[in-house]
Amino acid sequence: MALFGKNKKAAETLPLEDIILPKHVGIIMDGNGRWAKKRGLPRKVGHREGAKVFREITRYASKVGIKHLTVYAFSTENWKRPEDEVGALMKLFQSYLEEALTDFKDDDIVVRFIGDRTGFSPGLQKLMDENEEIAKDRDGMVLNIAMNYGSRDEIVRAVKIICAEVKSGRIDESEIDAKLVSDHLYTAGQPDPDLIIRPSGEYRISNFLLWQSAYTEFVIMNKLWPDFQKSDFDEALRIYSQRNRRYGGV
Ligand code: IPE
Ligand code: IPE
Ligand code: MG
C-alpha cells in the first residue's frame, strides 16, 4: 500500500497518460532480506529475487519514458553485513553484470555506475568498465547503478577534487558554487532526481543522493522490493504527479 495522504483518491484515478513524468527517478531497492525472512529463506534468495525485479522495472521505466533512472544496489555501509551475505551479493553482481552486457541492448539503455568501484574485485571492476563501454553510444534512458555508493563519500570526494583544482590554479576559489559542486559528483551532467521511491516502508534516505535530492519528491511504499511490480511504479508516478513542487517559492 502506498502512502497517498490527502491525494489518495486523485492519485488512484489519474490515467497514466495524464501524469507529469519525472525526468529522473531514483529507487532505493530495499527489503530483499525481509522478503526472504518472511518465507524462511536465506537472505541471498531475497537478493536474487530483487535482481529480477530490478531488470523488469528498469526496462519498464525506459518504456514509459523516464530519461534517467538511478538504482541503489549496494551502499558504502553494506560492507558491514555478514561475510556470507556480502559474498553472495558479489557473486550476484558478477553474474548479473555478465548478463547485463547484452541485457539492455534492445532497450537502448545506457548503463553507468556511480560509487567507488575500486572497492570491488578486479573482475567486477572490469565488468563494470565493459558494461559502460558497450553501452556508451546508446541513446535511451541512462541507468545509473549505485554500487559501493554513499553520498557522504561522494561529497567528500568532490571536495577533495575541487581543493586540488584550486591548489593547482585550474579554478579560482570564487568560481565554487552549487553548479560546480554538482559537476564534481558521480551524477555530473545529469538532472537531479525528481522522484525517489523507497519500497519496504522505511522513512529514510540511507546515504543516497543527499546533495542531489534537495528538492526531490519522496514516495515511500510498504511493499518489499522483490514484490514490487510495474503497477507499483505506475502508482509512484501518479503520486508524484499530484505533488505541488514549490522549490521554496509560493
Ligand atoms: C536491499 O535489501 C539490498 C541491499 C541493501 C544490498 P536489504 O538486504 O537491505 O533488505 P532488508 O532491508 O534487510 O529487508
Ligand atoms: C539502503 O538500504 C541501501 C540499498 C538499498 C542498497 P539499507 O537496507 O542498507 O539501509 P538501512 O540500513 O535500512 O538504512
Ligand atoms: Mg534494507
Image (cartoon, rainbow, N blue to C red):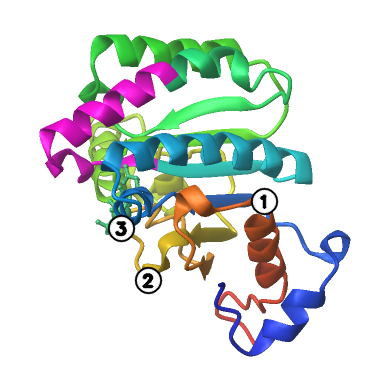
Left or right: residue 81 compared with residue 175: left
Disc 2 crowd, CA 10 A, few/some/many (<14, 14-19, 20+): few
What residue appears at the point 31 percent right and 49 percent down from the top-left corner? 33
Is residue 192 visible in the rendered structure shown here? no
Disc 1 crowd, CA 10 A, few/some/many (<14, 14-19, 20+): some
What residue appears at the point 28 percent right and 34 percent down from the top-left corner? 161
The part of the image, by quadrant, that contains residue 6 is bottom right
In the rendered structure, find residue 206 and report the number of the disc placed on it.
3
Q: Secondary structure at mark 3?
A: loop
Point out the image quarter for the N terminus. Answer: bottom right
Left or right: residue 134 compared with residue 170: right
- Using the numbered discs, state the Cα–Cα distance from disc 1 to disc 2 in whole angstroms: 22 Å
Q: Nearer the viewer, residue 101 or 140?
A: 101
What residue appears at the point 64 percent right and 75 percent down from the top-left corner? 245
In the rendered structure, find residue 85 and report the number of the disc placed on it.
none
Task: State the residue lying farthest toward the bottom.
Answer: 6
Q: Give the mark nearer the N terminus: 1 vs 2.
A: 2
Magenta stretch: helix, strand or loop mostly: helix
Disc nearest the viewer among 3 and 1: 1
Q: Secondary structure at mark 1?
A: helix
The residue under label 1 is 230
Name the amino acid, label 2.
Tyr
Rendered view: 6 above or below 238? below
Q: Which residues are magenta?
A: 73-95
Name the amino acid, label 3.
Ser
In the rendered structure, find residue 203 and report the number of the disc placed on it.
2
**Magenta highlight on residue 81:** yes
What residue appears at the point 36 percent right and 62 percent down from the top-left corner? 205
Name the amino acid, label 1.
Lys
Residues tagged 1 and 2 counted as in contact (Cβ below 8 A)? no
Specify whether tag 3 is near ligand 2 (CB below 8 Å).
yes
